[in-house]
Image (spheres, rainbow, N blue to C red):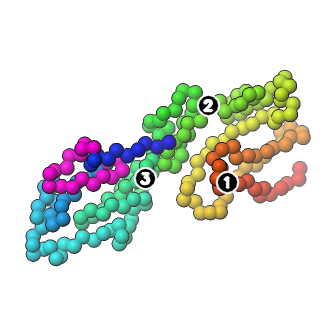
Amino acid sequence: MSFPDIDECTSGTHNCRMDQVCINLRGTFTCQCLPGYQKRGEQCVEIDVYLKPFLADINECDASNQCAQQCYNILGSFICQCNQGYELSSDRLNCEDINECETTNECREDEMCWNYHGGFRCYPRNPCQDPYVLTSENRCVCPVSNAMCRELPQSIVYKYMSIRSDRSVPSDIFQIQATTIYANTINTFRIKSGNENGEFYLRVSMLKQY
């Protein structure tokens, strides 16, 4: 989930002067002077006719784009902006993920907020499905007293994780190691959701005989 950008320029909530042009940016806006004018303080003044040939604007976004995500060229400079779900870092060039789970989100009381790069999602605090019952955080156990559990796994553990979309492909994302606590225990790993397009897969990296 992420929040849509409000276009202050079209909604009329900007404070640009009559002799300026409003340019919408994600999360904000900027006021620019008309061609042939330059900003002095809050006003736009005409560029001296003798200086015009020497004041050609350099598009820094095309020449040497230093912005991590979005670059907007303005007269004599440039502005970096971030994609939805990110905010500019202190250097005004790079972008940092906004943790909506710590600020604002729309998750219900029976849901937990999971932050990922560029947004967040709401997951049920109790992921267990009948006949499983929740025994600890993200762990579901099938009671031995229930006849339905005889043909089902004794327990299921859910793990949530966020993955950056700019990773090189293919690459290893994480590694899970199974530990045998009880005799004749069989561990099975599955991708529960988030792999509808078949972009991820599990593989055995090493087998050990115990």
Residue 99 shows up from this direction:
no
Give the magenta part as a residue range: 11-28
Q: Is residue 110 left or right of residue 4?
A: right
Question: Can you name the residue that lies furthest to the front here?
Answer: 10
Determine the residue located farthest toward the top in the rendered image: 145
The residue pinned by badge 2 equals: 125
Residue at coordinates 37% horizontally, 55% vertically from top-left? 81
Q: Is residue 153 visible?
A: yes
At horizontal 38% and vertical 67% (from top left) the residue drawn is 65
Task: Using the numbered discs, state the Cα–Cα distance from disc 2 to disc 3 in whole angstroms.
Answer: 29 Å
Amino acid type at image mark 3: Asn
**Image location of residue 83, percent across then percent down:** 43, 53
Residue 172 sits in quarter:
bottom right
> What SS does tag 2 mark?
loop
Element assignment for label 3: loop
Disc assigned to residue 198 = 1
- Do callouts 1 and 2 mark residues in contact (Cβ within 8 Å)? no
The three-letter code of the residue at mark 2 reads Arg
Amino acid type indicated by mark 1: Gly
Mark 3 and mark 1: Cα distance apart in space: 26 Å
* Element type where label 1 sits in the image: loop
Q: Which residue is mark 3?
A: 83
| Circle 3 Cα neighbour tier, 10 Å, few/some/many (<14 / 14–19 / ≥20) | some
Relative image position of residue 40 (x, y in whole percent): 14, 59
Where's residue 74, x and y in %? 27, 62
Query: Which comes before the other along the chain, label 1 or label 2?
Result: 2
Decide which of tag 2 and tag 3 comes sooner along the chain.
Answer: 3
